[in-house]
Image: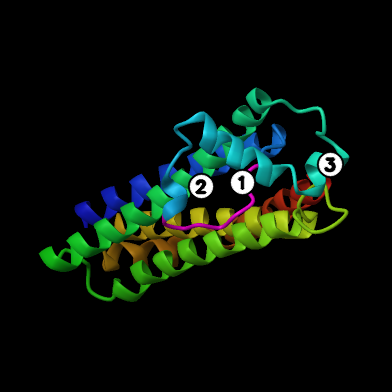
Amino acid sequence: NRQAIIWLSVLLLMIVCMVVVGGMTRLTDSGLSIVEWKPISGVLFPSSREEWLIEFEKYKLIPEFTLVNSDMTIEDFKYIYLWEWGHRQLGRAIGVVWFAGFALLMIKKWIPRGWTIKFLLIGVLVGFQGLIGWWMVYSGLKPGMTDVSSYRLATHLGMAFFIVGLILWYILSLRLNYESLMLNRRSRDQKLYVFMNIYLCALFVQIILGALVAG
């Protein structure tokens, strides 16, 4: 399972970085700087003054600019644009790493028995997370809105942590063979197991509440 574990570990690290960059995007108020959803052509970064002016004019049409940032210069805009662009590029990179890794494991027949659907599930969730991200951004572009919906923000963050937890669970499971897994389950401390699950659920709820407060 070594190849699959390496692949999953890279994905896990990238998604953790994605959460950190997403947090910085929120703190710098950069999330609404890109007002369009372009999964393919959006990979291109503005390279000339004319292209920057076009992007800035699009930003000027949304409520966040007219109600909050009407004194923003194009240099200020470049700063927030860079954060959101980087956030989206990292999301695209995660999709590419998932697809490339999954395809390689399939071609080389390195996928452990019974794990194909589980690995596919990660790809589906990553793609769905991208849609949730745009659904969140879109809420901040509506009339009278100067930020994204806090409920959609919480959904986006919650899905990120769910994917992180799922991948980590897969990595830990792949590190054990079936016999070791069964022995560990039989010999575990049942009381500690229950308390640990309560703690993890409470931690997850607290993370979601943190997103709602941030919103």
Which residue matches tag 3? 66
Q: Position of residue 153 (x, y in %)?
A: 71, 54
Q: Amino acid at mark 2?
A: Arg
Q: Quadrant of the N terminus?
A: bottom left
| Residue drawn at point x = 42 percent, y = 44 percent | 44
Q: Position of residue 171 (x, y in %)?
A: 36, 55
Q: Amino acid at mark 3?
A: Thr
Which residue matches tag 1? 34
Query: Residue 39: within the magenta?
Result: yes
Q: Secondary structure at mark 3?
A: helix
Check disc 3: other Cα within 10 Å, few if <14, some if 14-19, many if 20+: some
3D distance between C-alphas at marks 2 and 1: 10 Å
Q: Which residues are magenta?
A: 31-40
Q: Position of residue 151 (x, y in %)?
A: 77, 59
83 vs 2, left or right, is: right
Which residue matches tag 2? 88
102 vs 27, left or right, is: left
Disc 2 or disc 1, which is closer to the eye? 1
User: Which badge, 3 or 2, is on the more N-terminal residue?
Assistant: 3
